[in-house]
Image (cartoon, helix red, strand yellow):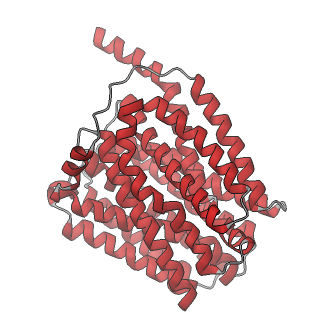
Amino acid sequence: MAASGVSTVQERGTALPILITRVAICIFAVSQTMLSPLITQIGAAFGLGLGGSGFLFTAYYISNIFFCLVTGRIIAMIGKRTAMKAGLIFYALVTFAFAHTHSFAIACVFISCMGALATFIEAVGMDLVDDMSPVDAASNLTMTHGIAGIGMVGGVVYSGLMLNAGYDWRTIYTMMSVAVGAVAVVFCVVRFPKMHQSAAGGLAELKHWFTRRELYPTYLALFLYVGAEGAVTGWMATFMTATLGYSSLLASLGTAAIWTVVTVGRIVCAGLVGTRYTVRALVSFLCTICVIGILLTAGVTMPILFWVALLLVGAGLSALWPLIASTALDAGNNGGTVMSLILFFGYFGAAVIPYLIGLIGDAAGLRMALIASAIVFAALGLVVRFVMPRSVSEKRTQG
């Protein structure tokens, strides 16, 4: 009985900290998606075309490849809550600086810092929530990323509405920096429960998890998924405006529709996924939905079918990342270090694949770029089904 009482008090004491941490994670989500509707306007401000504008995606993600590897070490040195405070404050400052630079090279440096800090906020936030939440890794990650999906939707809707109202990208990012500063203030005043100290997270720890051969297919799957997701959602608004003739607002709403379904799908999966479903079966099914949806967006001519296809894409994307990532988290007992590697391989894909898809779009048109993205999702399904060890891919998710 006493144990039950302690558990109840503990859950009550963590409700508000978990909420504000998930709001902070939404900052990472907004940062990712708000760039998509603005990408061509930012590029045009610096005299760049489609291919040059696409380098902003690479700049945003490239620093993540290296920064996420030291996240576990930073968490161990200064603590999770202090790390989150620092991440939010620096993110607000860098976003403001990005909005006011007039050099493309410096803009790339600032947006690279934004990407690194957004990743840092995500990793620290996931580790914080994982410590405070009593549920298992798969369900916890799915729910947290479902809530982060609100930020994904909010990012594209925010950019689209502001563009439609006549604001330029500089004003949009300036207002974003103010909002992040406000979240940082709230995070600083909320009281958090005492949590265990993270392990050192040094090079030896990284090497240990990096060399776990049974996790290589998981790392490859994360590379493919995050890269393909970034390509589809990053270029969809441009495809809708440049190829299909939609307004910037409708194009933003199209991307928002994808993220809305992703959000709902992740929350539903967190509550309904049962012991009879394996990671292999779920990922294979969702990849199939993704491929069908993307091919339809690239090929249909009827507007109603196009919008239905967008919803299919969102349904396919919904639980892929948390399901794949959970196979690595469940294998390790150092959340900070394992999460760093999960993000490392994911953002490596995000730095490479969207840029390559943009080059395909420049050379062969954005329809072919979408088809190439569908091929990546097909490859992801094959990796999980035929390459990932059964001990990992046939782990049964817990509802």
Position of 172 relative to 6 (above/below): below
Q: Which residue appears farthest toward the right when viewing the image?
A: 166
Q: How many marks overall?
A: 0
Position of 186 relative to 214 (above/below): above
Position of 254 with respect to 217 (left or right) is: right
Tell me, yes or no, if residue 212 can be seen here: yes
Residue appearing at x 42%, y 34% in the figure? 128
Position of 81 relative to 333 (above/below): above
Q: Position of residue 136 (x, y in %)?
A: 31, 38
Residue toward you, 40 or 393: 40
Position of 240 with respect to 247 (left or right) is: left
Q: Which residue appears farthest toward the top when viewing the image?
A: 2
Q: Position of residue 388 (x, y in %)?
A: 20, 63
Residue appearing at x 65%, y 44% in the figure? 93
Q: Position of residue 100 (x, y in %)?
A: 74, 56
Residue appearing at x 46%, y 19% in the figure? 12
Q: Which residue appears farthest toward the bottom when viewing the image?
A: 364
Residue toward you, 312 or 115: 115
Task: Indicate the quadrant where residue 261 lies.
Answer: bottom right
Residue toward you, 231 or 246: 231
Quadrant housing the N terminus: top left
Quadrant housing the C terminus: top left
Residue appearing at x 80%, y 63% in the figure? 164
